[in-house]
Image: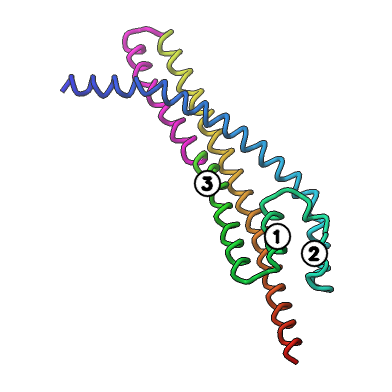
Amino acid sequence: MSIITNILFWISTGMLLPVIILLLISFIFSLISLGELYGGFMQRLKNRKKLAILEKNIRENGLKVIYDNEILKTDSTFTDSLNKMLEFKFNKTITEKLLNDFLSSKDRNIGKSVILTRTGPMLGLMGTLIPMGPALTGLASGDVASMASNMQVAFATTVVGIFTGGCGFISSFLSERWYKEDYDFLEYIAETAFIENKNEVLNEKK
């Protein structure tokens, strides 16, 4: 029995370094996600009033106000999809495909943050529990310095893991909300275009 427990102890102790490396990589990605989140927030802040005015103009004057609108010159997944819709003149099949592609793009981008949300605390917990064994051994043998060193690692990995998970959660939550707003607006434009195209066909028949 002691052999099995020793093997398990060696395995768990050997996993500490890979866990710390993965935790540091996750921490770097969490900082990158925060930077991207800030950039996206500033971009939306600039375009919020423009989109509100555009939506009002569409309701009053139809889709003709979209063409050559300055919002189309901004660089984002939203404007890329809208430009392609305009390029294909709101062909129903292509427009629906573009809307589905937009949702797929959302899932891919938010997926990174979701992974951080789940793996950050998991790695932090592993980094907390693994050094506890050597720390307890040091406490039992009276080696206070070894116990303190292992406890320091345990607390540090906990903090980094929680921070990483928190960044992932905030990023995924806000990104999900923003993508939904963009998708709803694209869907609104597409439905408006379908109605206008249908009315044009009816007028031509008359």
Q: Is residue 185 visible?
A: no
User: In the rendering, at what x and y percent does residue 167 appear?
Assistant: 59, 38
Which residue carries the number 3 mark? 111
Amino acid at the residue labelled 1: Leu
Instruction: Give the label on residue 82, or none.
Output: 1
| Dot 2 amino acid type | Ile
Is residue 43 visible in the rendered structure shown here? Answer: yes
The magenta segment: 117-144
Q: Which residue is mark 2?
A: 66
51 and 98: which is toward the camera? 98
Q: Which mark is residue 25?
A: none
Residue at position x 55%, y 34% in the image? 164
Q: Secondary structure at mark 3?
A: helix
Which of the two residues, 169 or 196, is positioned nearer the viewer here? 196
Residue at the location (34% across, 20% down)?
13
Q: CA distance from mark 3 to mark 1?
A: 23 Å
Quadrant in the rendering for residue 140: top left
Q: CA distance from mark 1 to mark 2?
A: 10 Å
Queried whether the magenta region covers residue 136, the answer comes back as yes
Residue at the left extreme?
1
Quadrant placement of the N terminus: top left
Q: Position of residue 14 (x, y in %)?
A: 34, 20
- Circles 1 and 2, Cβ within 8 Å, touching? The answer is yes
Q: Would you identify the image quadrant in which residue 196 lies? A: bottom right
